[in-house]
Amino acid sequence: MRFKIHRGTKEIGGSCVEVWTESTRIILDFGMPLVGKDGKEFDFGKYKTSNLNELISKEILPDIEGLYDSSKKLIDGVIISHPHQDHYGLANFINKNVQYYLGEATHKIIELNNLFTPQEIYLKNTKYFEKEKSFKIGDISVTPYWADHSAFDAYSFLIETNNKSLFYSGDFRSHGRKAKAFYWFTHNAPQNVDYLLLEGTTISRDNKPFKTEPEIENELIELFEEQCKINLIYTSGQNIDRLTSIYKACKRTRKIFVVDVYVAKVLNELSKFAGIPYPSENFENLKVMFPFYTSRRLKKEGNEKILYQFKKYKITKGEISNQSDKIVMIVRPSMQKDLEKINGVEGGNFIYSMWEGYLQKPNTKKFVDYLIKRKFTIHKIHTSGHADTKTLKKMVEAIKPKNIVPIHTFESKKYQKIFTDTNVVRLKDNEVVTID
Ligand SMILES: [Zn+2]
């Protein structure tokens, strides 16, 4: 078995790993980069007019035979670890006949992104895997392990052939609402793994353990208990762990949790996979707001049925204004027009609950400025979607791999200082490793 990391040895985002034997070739993740060669935020818009060959020569797309062009033998499978764009976001360039392997909920989230975001990624041939159930692609055996991550449906993978093995960590942590999945893993991890490809997103940050989701829930409760204030929260509509923390904090402080149609649809679809709150009779304090731009888009594209689906749970801007001290509402910059129609909320709390770096985005800055003008107090309540150093060490201790390969990190040079008992192999992008 051989493998190479096409992208990810020296950066976070854009992950892509190829694994192959004499007869089979597979890809693990096919992500959109997060940073460009200049170190600035990656903007695919700059390459919109480039054709496939130009994208390959500019190293935006990895150069992989049989992935794009059907005149060559097609690659045997593309595995997607979880529904974050930096792990699947370039998939619309892949030949339509390629077979995908992914979680069913992951596919659902990718489809929802087509409805609510500018993305257009349609996967034709999909096979859904389940945690701990091994499957074969040619002579390669793949076992998915369920991971605790800020994405809803995330996995790590054991890749095996002829007694040789590689473990791809994907993105993971142990302080989220699926901490038990990681705890289970530490007791059931595969052994004698030759190479562990280990994410190190947070390695450059300080060494303190990260706050858990239940701790986030308690911090939210403290704010919600302040009297006579509306609470607006800006968080990812797909961070189900965080939305659950907010819902629980609302329940404990008798608040009404208001989500917009987009978040309502995400919760509704994913409630088929897990016991999460979603607009229904079972969750009385969960209401749905219909934002102007989202509603207009859904109507324009013939998807009004999504609006009707949540009509029963609708809360109007007037109703929010009239009882604003009882309201906790998910917001984002595109909802400023809607907030302008909500009265009497000056002096409320605005809770920023995402990675701090995104605060630098111009539209986020503009939105925060608008809320400051309306005398909102800004609070930052967040915890990382990725493992802290302690958790990374626990994964290494559980697997006891022969070698660790840094991936999804800016700090590969720090690995050997952290994992002192294991050999760290720092690869370059496109460097081939033979496991024999
Ligand atoms: Zn991720």
Image: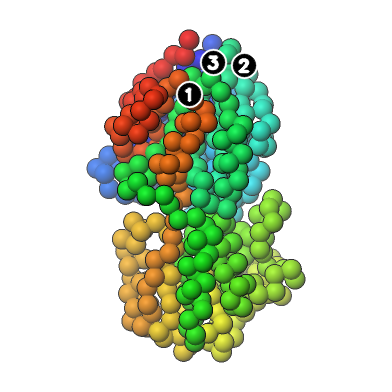
As helix, strand or loop, the secondary structure at mark 3 comes to strand
The answer to whether residue 131 is above or below residue 118 is: above
Q: Position of residue 168 (x, y in %)?
A: 50, 30
Residue 295 visible in the picture: no
User: Which residue carries the number 2 mark?
Assistant: 139
**Disc 3 versus disc 1: distance between alpha carbons?**
12 Å
Circle 1 crowding by C-alpha within 10 Å: few under 14, some 14–19, many from 20: many
**On the image, numbered disc 1 is attached to which residue?**
401
Gap in Å between the C-alphas at discs 2 and 3? 12 Å
Left or right placement of residue 200 versus residue 159 in this view:
left
Circle 1: element type: loop
Comes first in the chain, label 3 or label 1: 3
Q: Residue at x 67, y 37 (%)?
A: 130
Q: Amino acid at mark 3?
A: Lys
- N-term mark: 1 or 2: 2
Q: What residue is at 57 percent from the left and 87 percent from the top?
A: 323
The answer to whether marks 1 and 2 mark residues whose Cβ atoms lie closer than 8 Å is: no
